[in-house]
Image (cartoon, grey):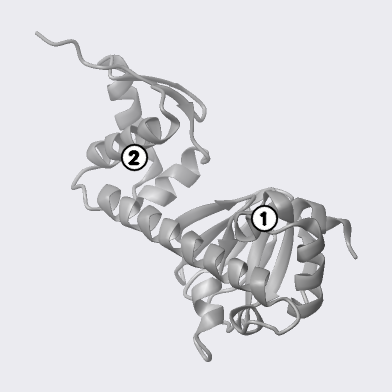
């Protein structure tokens, strides 16, 4: 058994499942383990997949690209999270986005149909695995809805403030780092990088925020 089974204990999909139980499940699910280098494509849009991916270390990004090379980052998936599960669960569906390694990463792929079919040998903790998957899907739905909130804003400035405000709330601090570099943030918010950089400079001059690379400090406005 690969040593990746130890990393499964920190993965949300295997919450409440012991190392011994994980090994039994691996025998049932027939996992595929691999490592990818930064910028390497993992899955490509337009292709079918029967597997969902688990990020054991590093991170990946889901992107949409048009024929002219314009890129839109849908989301970043870090260690402990999953990707491609909706498409793997629906036979015949094609991926609407590509998945690319954001950095060197270690991945595990599981056949979703086998995961959703509870086996006789490991019924109790296989059911736990399914419960964990449902919880993850619920959380991802909330993240997607949050992104729609940001994109629904009319201007680049409003999109930036919406996103940064939500990050501060999630981190519980006005000082925080975001998981995107400048170009990735522009792609995530569906705005031009130059226009976004201009707005960031304006916001900093106005005393609303300070930033250096991907680290931000938000300033609360003083009440009059």
Q: Is residue 145 left or right of residue 152?
A: right
Q: Is residue 217 above or below residue 187?
A: above
Q: Indicate which disc, 1 or 2, sits on the residue closer to the N terminus.
A: 1
Q: Residue at x 43, y 50 (%)?
A: 187
Q: Residue at x 49, y 75 (%)?
A: 86
Find numbered disc 1 in the image and state the secondary structure of the residue it sits on: loop
Q: Residue at x 21, y 47 (%)?
A: 153
Q: Residue at x 73, y 65 (%)?
A: 108
Specify whether residue 64 is in view: yes
Specify whether residue 216 is in view: no
Nearest the viewer among 13 and 60 is 13
Q: Is residue 20 left or right of residue 70?
A: right
Q: Is residue 97 above or below residue 170?
A: below
Nearest the viewer among 78 and 9 is 9
Residue under circle 2? 163
Nearest the viewer among 69 and 170 is 170
Q: Is residue 36 left or right of residue 14?
A: right
Which quarter of the picture shows residue 114?
bottom right
Report the quarter where the C terminus lies.
Answer: top left
Residue under circle 1? 39
């Amino acid at each position: 058994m690969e040593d990746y089974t130890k990393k499964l204990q920190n993965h949300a999909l295997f919450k409440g499942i012991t190392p011994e139980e994980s090994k039994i499940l691996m025998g049932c699910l027939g996992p595929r383990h691999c490592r990818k280098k930064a910028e390497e494509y993992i899955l490509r849009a337009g292709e079918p997949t029967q597997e969902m991916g688990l990020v054991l270390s590093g991170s990946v990004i889901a992107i949409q690209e048009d024929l002219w090379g314009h890129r839109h980052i849908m989301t970043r998936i870090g260690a402990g999270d999953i990707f491609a599960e909706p498409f793997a669960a629906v036979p015949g569906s094609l991926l609407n986005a590509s998945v690319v390694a954001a950095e060197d990463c270690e991945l595990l792929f599981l056949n979703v149909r086998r995961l959703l079919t509870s086996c006789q040998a490991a019924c109790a903790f296989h059911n736990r695995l399914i419960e964990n998957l449902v919880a993850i899907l619920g959380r991802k739905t909330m993240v997607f809805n949050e992104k729609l909130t940001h994109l629904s804003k009319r201007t680049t400035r409003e999109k930036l403030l919406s996103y940064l405000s939500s990050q501060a709330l999630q981190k519980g601090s006005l000082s925080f780092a975001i998981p995107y570099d400048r170009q990735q943030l522009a792609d995530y918010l569906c705005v031009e990088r130059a226009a976004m950089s201009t707005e960031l400079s304006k916001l900093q001059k106005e005393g609303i925020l300070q930033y250096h690379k991907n680290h931000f400090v938000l300033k609360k406005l003083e009440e009059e």
